[in-house]
Image: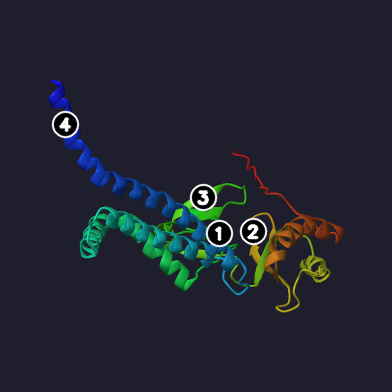
Amino acid sequence: MTQEDVQQIIDSIIPVVSQYGLDLVGALAILIIGWWVAGWVKRSVRRGLDRIDSMDATLKPFISSIARYLVLVFVIVGVLNQFGVETTSIIAVLGAAGLAVGLALQGTLSNVAAGVMLLLLRPFRSGDYVDAGSVSGTIKEIGLFATELTTPQGVSILSPNASLWNSAITNYSRNPTRRADVSVGIAYGDDIEVARKALMDLMQNDERVLKDPAPVVFVTLLGDSSVNLQMRCWANNADFWPLYFHLTEACKAAVEKAGCSIPFPQRDVHLFNSD
């Protein structure tokens, strides 16, 4: 290759670089600045929503994410416009790309639709403890595609919104009160009324037990080795588990103090002489 050939190649490249180089630099600048602005908008929207006391905590991350994606859409349009693409062409390209992406990501889009339905119908909110299908835990954040939960063991779970929406959701935090049922067995030779009074006193002397509905004690089963009594009372949601654990432990001491016993499973064996 002669020097003249090299010079011709350089002369042919220079106009291309001159024409599209500035456009490329501008597009990169728009992309970088737009990406930073999108993150800043998300953080600003979140901070603004945090100052609104009446705003549901469940909606804050979802709305801030939507704001970020809207800014990114305008950034992409600006990058394409930097290369001289007409607005009508941009809309057509976005429409075709949206159709192609929609067909390729049907599962992902179903998560978006499920997230919208979860926010509209509100089967749970941030801070609620729920059981939905194969996952259970405290709701931390409902995102655009998935919901983050934290288990009682401190494990973080990221569940697709569609999985939650398509499952039966049990919300343990929705109602302000919950019923506690604790069973205890006494021997067949013990006095049922004595045991009932001991268990009733145990519940009535606990301030966490609500007066309405009133606590009750009743026989649930005549078992093989014991007469099973059930303590039933209502408590505020925040007091449920501490009260449940306390009653489970204290009921043993209460019936034993009253002169009753808690029998363990036993079996009578009768021997017959073959003669």
Q: Amino acid at mark 1?
A: Ile
4 vs 2, front mark: 4
| Residue 210: quadrant of the picture | bottom right
Circle 3: element type: strand
3 vs 4, front mark: 4
The earlier-in-sequence mark between 2 and 3 is 3
Q: Amino acid at mark 3?
A: Ile
| Residue 12: quadrant of the picture | top left
Task: Report how far apart the C-alphas of labels 1 and 4 lie in the structure.
Answer: 63 Å
**Label 3 Cα neighbours within 10 Å, binned few <14 / some 14-19 / many ≥20:** some
Judging by the rendered image, the residue that carries numbered circle 1 is: 139
**Which residue sits at x=72%, y=65%?**
239
Task: Report how far apart the C-alphas of labels 3 and 4 lie in the structure.
Answer: 58 Å
One can see residue 266 in this view: yes
Q: Nearer the viewer, residue 65 or 212?
A: 65
Q: Amino acid at mark 2?
A: Gly
**Which residue sits at x=21%, y=42%?**
16
The earlier-in-sequence mark between 4 and 2 is 4
Disc number placed over residue 223 in the picture, else none: 2
Q: Does residue 266 lie above or below 127 as drawn?
A: above
Q: Position of residue 245 (x, y in %)?
A: 73, 57
The earlier-in-sequence mark between 2 and 1 is 1
Disc number placed over residue 9 in the picture, else none: 4
Circle 4: element type: helix
Q: Nearer the viewer, residue 111 or 193?
A: 111
Q: Are marks 3 and 1 in contact (CB under 8 Å)?
A: no
**Which residue sits at x=49%, y=55%?**
39
Judging by the rendered image, the residue that carries numbered circle 3 is: 157
Circle 1: element type: strand
Colour setup of the view: rainbow
